[in-house]
Image (cartoon, helix red, strand yellow):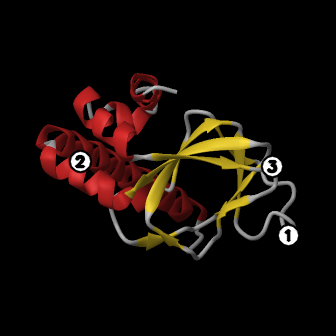
Amino acid sequence: MSIEDDINFLSHVPMLRLLGRSALRVLAIGAESRYVHGGEILFRKGDAADSGYVVQEGAFKLTAGSPRENPDSRIMVRAGGLMSELGLITRTIHPLTASAAEPSTVIRIPRSLFMKMLESHQDAALKLRDHFASRIDESVHDLAAVRDAFKKTGVR
């Protein structure tokens, strides 16, 4: 794939679309493509998350334990999906294990690259901040609704 192909592909990922073509160009140039064999583990629950992964081809199963412990996992991330989103912006650990459900390719975006891009593209940083603020507001609203539902049933 060419850099332009990578930019076009990344522009279809909902969170990354917000950044704009100039910022996506930086990511496309600096990111790395990685092939993952079917059944291979990309990252494990509890590992440090130092990057985000966009599924380019194939699919990944996300499980709370090893894929062998939970073979019926229903959480699948397919082409165009972003995994380890928070790993792009902060030091954290992976809450789930990601294993390739079939031969797959990912675009790995290191946090250091993502942060440098945000430093040089302040408009992208502001759009990303607004995106996360909106998602946090939605989560707070959802939690309040769950709390209210539990209050009505008498569950504490």
Which residue is drawn at the image coordinates 30% and 33% (left, top)? 25
Q: Earlier in the sequence, mark 3 or mark 1?
A: 3
The residue tagged 2 is 117
- Residue 48 image point, x, y percent: 50, 74
Looking at the rendered structure, the kind of residue marked 1 is Glu
Q: CA distance from mark 3 to mark 1?
A: 17 Å
- Near-viewer residue (129 or 19): 19
Depth-wise, is mark 1 or mark 2 nearer the camera? 2
Q: CA distance from mark 3 to mark 2?
A: 32 Å
Tell me if 34 is positioned left or right of 138 in this view.
right
Which residue is drawn at the image coordinates 55% and 62% (left, top)? 150
Q: Residue furthest front?
A: 2
- Residue 148 image point, x, y percent: 47, 58
Q: Earlier in the sequence, mark 1 or mark 2?
A: 1
Q: Assign the C terminus to one quadrant of the image.
A: bottom right
The residue tagged 3 is 38
Looking at the rendered structure, the kind of residue marked 2 is Met
- Residue 31 image point, x, y percent: 42, 46
Which residue is drawn at the image coordinates 80% and 43% (left, top)? 102
The residue tagged 1 is 69
